[in-house]
Structure formats: structure tokens, C-alpha cells
Amino acid sequence: MSALRELYQQVIIDHGRHPRNHGIVENATHSHHGYNPLCGDKLNLTINIQDEIIQDVKFIGSGCAISIASASLMTEILRGKKIDHVHELFQQVHQLLTGHCENPEQLGKLSVLSGVAEFPARVKCATLSWHTLNAALAQSDSPVSTE
């Protein structure tokens, strides 16, 4: 087993079992709900944004280890980021998860999600939190579904 694949498995298991930033942001300025009907993943994301910078972000949800781990990793990375950077990050992560990222190490800790590209059926699990984030930032009323 390659070192990156082993790291991928360890990080997914760790974040899946012990998600970071699990809960609700009490003073949320943005929120949204996401659902993956393929495997039943559900996610509620709450965010506090001040002056175009994410001050706090948390999620509650249930689902597979990949879905929970991706949300946990995402919330760790987002705190303190400018909204413009978050939109760029979404594109980079989407490319990573679909196997089209030329330089995964530029994503730092998120690069461990590159292993998801080997399992196309799991890409929707990993992208649920990111699509929910986009909808929350857009303050969309439309439900987020990976279908």
C-alpha cells in the first residue's frame, strides 16, 4: 500500500470517527442543508462571515466516513479564509476529487482526499459538504442534492 493511500485511509477514519467543528454556529450569518440520496448522507452547515472572512464554521450531519471526514477537513481549512479564496478552493477540491488536479500538494491537508478519485461512486459523498458550502455562501433557497 502506498504511503499516500495509507495516509488517506488514516485521515478519513480519524475525521470520520472524530469530526472537527461538529456542532452549530450560534451566530451564523449563513447556513444550508445538503443531502446525498445515493447513500443517505445529510449535512447542515452553519457559518459566521464578517467582512468577507469566515470567522466560524461548523456542521452537523450523518453519513458515511468519507462524507463526514470531508466536512470535517473542510471546516478546519475554511476558518479565517476570505470568501474569494473559498470559491477558488472549491474549484481546486472538485478537481482533486475527480482526479483532474495537477498539483494536489498545493491543497495541503486536503490533498489526502485525492484517494476519493479512485472510487467514483464516493465522489458525491466527498463533495456534499463543498456543494452545501457554495449554496450557503450564495444564500440559495434551493436544496443541495448530489443527484
Image (tube, rainbow, N blue to C red):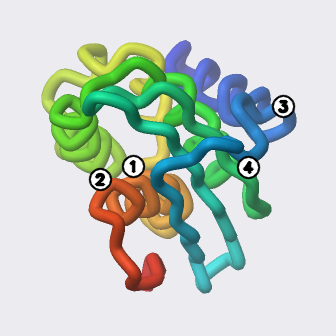
In the rendered image, residue 142, in percent from the top left (x then y), is placed at 39, 84
Is residue 138 or residue 17 the one in the foreground? 138
Residue 70 visible here = yes
Q: Are marks 2 and 1 in contact (CB under 8 Å)?
A: yes
Q: Which residue corresponds to mark 3?
A: 18
* Cβ atoms at labels 3 and 1 below 8 Å apart: no
How far apart marks 2 and 3 lie (CA) works out to 25 Å
Residue type, label 3: His
Q: Label 2 is placed on what type of residue?
A: Thr
Q: CA distance from mark 2 to mark 4?
A: 18 Å
Which disc number belongs to residue 98?
2
Cβ–Cβ below 8 Å for labels 3 and 4?
A: no
Which circle's residue, 3 or 1, is located before the other in the chain? 3
Residue 101 placement, left or right of 3: left
Counting other residues with Cα less than 10 Å from the Cα at mark 3, is it few (<14), some (14-19), or many (20 or more)? few
- N-terminal of the pair, mark 4 or mark 1, is 4
**Front of the two marks 2 and 3:** 3
Residue 95 lies, with reference to residue 10, above or below; the image says below
Q: Which of pointers 3 and 4 lies earlier in the amino acid sequence?
A: 3
Q: Residues within 10 Å of mark 2 (few under 14, many from 20)?
A: some
Distance between mark 2 and mark 1 Cα atoms? 5 Å
Q: Nearer the viewer, mark 3 or mark 4?
A: 3
Q: Amino acid at mark 4?
A: Ala
Q: Are marks 4 and 1 in contact (CB under 8 Å)?
A: no
Label drawn at residue 117: 1
Q: Earlier in the sequence, mark 2 or mark 1?
A: 2
Q: Secondary structure at mark 2?
A: loop
Q: Residues within 10 Å of mark 1 (few under 14, many from 20)?
A: some
Tell me the kind of residue under disc 1.
Answer: Ala
Residue that mark 4 sits on: 65
The residue carrying pointer 4 sits among few (fewer than 14), some (14 to 19) or many (20 or more) residues within 10 Å by Cα, namely: some
Circles 2 and 4: CB atoms closer than 8 Å: no
